[in-house]
Amino acid sequence: MAYSDKVVEHYNNPRNVGSLPKEDPNVGTGLVGAPECGDVMKLQMKINPETQVIEEAKFKTFGCGSAIASSSLATEWVKGKTVEEALSIKNTDIVRELSLPPVKIHCSVLAEDAIKAAIGDWKKKHGIEVPVAEKVAH
Amino acid sequence: MSMPATSKTNAPAQDYFAIFGLPRKLWMERDALEQKYLQLSWKLHPDNFVNATEEERERSLRRSSELNDAYRTLEDPVARVEYLLSLENMRKEGEHKQQAPPELLEEVFELNESLDELREAKSAGSDLASLKSRLESAEKNFGEKLGEVDAQLQVTAREWDDALDRNADDVARRKIMGRLNELLNRRSYVRNLVVNVAKELGEA
Ligand code: FES
């Protein structure tokens, strides 16, 4: 499969690979998987409880190049955004940015799900209600 | 030339079970399926359509390619389950995605991480013999897990057939299909690990 330049670029130089302490109350962890292919993705963010700004984001993905690029891009995008802003990131934005072909759309869905799951986890730690629609959007 | 009464030109394609004249059961006799496949293929063989109209010939071609798809799907026990679930609208790829239970994802993630460590150890040039034995034990471990999933899949498939036999209600059927679906998901994660570890071993 031919990957777009942007995918290759993220794949070769993935940003923000790693992990954050899961137990930290300010860290939200999202662990999601794609049953289509069996790939898994973990995305973590450190969120400032006062400002709700995402100060740090890390990921680790066991999956295809598109999944790695999608999660790498997702960590870049969420950094510096507020929780609400980050929640508005759609998988279609990722598809567009990385020029993913139709068969690779589920890889970008994985990244969107991971953002939502990480924020959901953080909200849960802070006793914030997670609206049903936000929990699993797919 | 007059069209046969049951012209299928506009009829919706038959589902794979119906093509073979089978109920939607998961247990199948392999040989019987093959026999039936050969019979049906023979009926659709182009030699039988030498004097047929263009339309009939096209239809027979279409049907024989359908038949091939049907056989390939039903012949494979896992693909058969997948197909049944999509037929019953229980497995829609993409739009209706099923998130696996967190414990499973966690387990898969950890297994992937252990595989990753082995990979790193390899590129760091650690002792190949010990690495190989670790990879082999990982392979055995994943292989066993895959075997477990397949065994569970078989048991649950039998439950499905039983449910059809005793004409179980929709709720009961959906419950079984839900479990089949979960097992298929689990299988896809585990299979991925098996493939990856085999790849590492091939290169070790
Ligand atoms: S192929 Fe499954 S995440 Fe990309």
Image: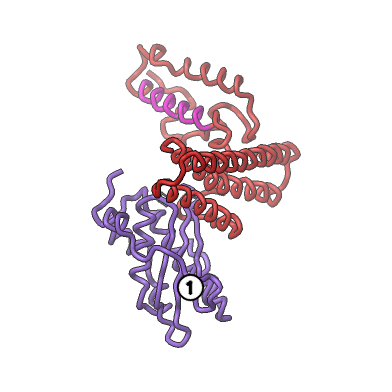
Chain colours: A purple, B red
Amino acid type of the residue tagged 1 in the rendering: Ile
How crowded pointer 1 is (Cα within 10 Å; few <14, some 14-19, many 20+) is rated as: many
**B133 to the left or right of A108:** right
Badge count: 1
**Residue B204: where, in percent of width, then height?**
43, 38
Residue at x 56%, y 73% (from the top left corner): A23
**Where, by quadrant of the figure, is residue A55 drawn?**
bottom left
In the picture as drawn, the residue positioned furthest to the right comes out as B166
Check residue B31 for magenta coloring. no
**Residue A46: where, in percent of width, then height?**
45, 76
The image shows residue A19, relative to residue A2, as above or below, that is below
Observer able to see residue A66: yes
Residue at x 55%, y 48% (from the top left corner): B185
**Residue A25: where, in percent of width, then height?**
54, 78
Residue nearest the observer in this picture, B203 or B49: B203
Residue nearest the observer in this picture, B117 or B170: B117
Check residue B70 for magenta coloring. yes
Residue at x 51%, y 45% (from the top left corner): B193
Residue nearest the observer in this picture, A51 or A104: A51
For mark 1, name the chain: A
Residue at x 53%, y 28% (from the top left corner): B19
The answer to whether the residue bearing label 1 lies less than 8 angstroms from the nearest atom of ligand 1 is no
**Residue B164: where, in percent of width, then height?**
70, 39
Q: Magenta residues, as a range?
A: B57-73
Q: Which residue is mark 1?
A: A119
For mark 1, give the secondary structure. helix
In the picture as drawn, the residue positioned furthest to the left comes out as A5
**A46 to the left or right of B75:** left
Magenta span main SS:
helix
Observer able to see residue B87: no
Q: Quadrant of the N terminus of chain A?
A: top left
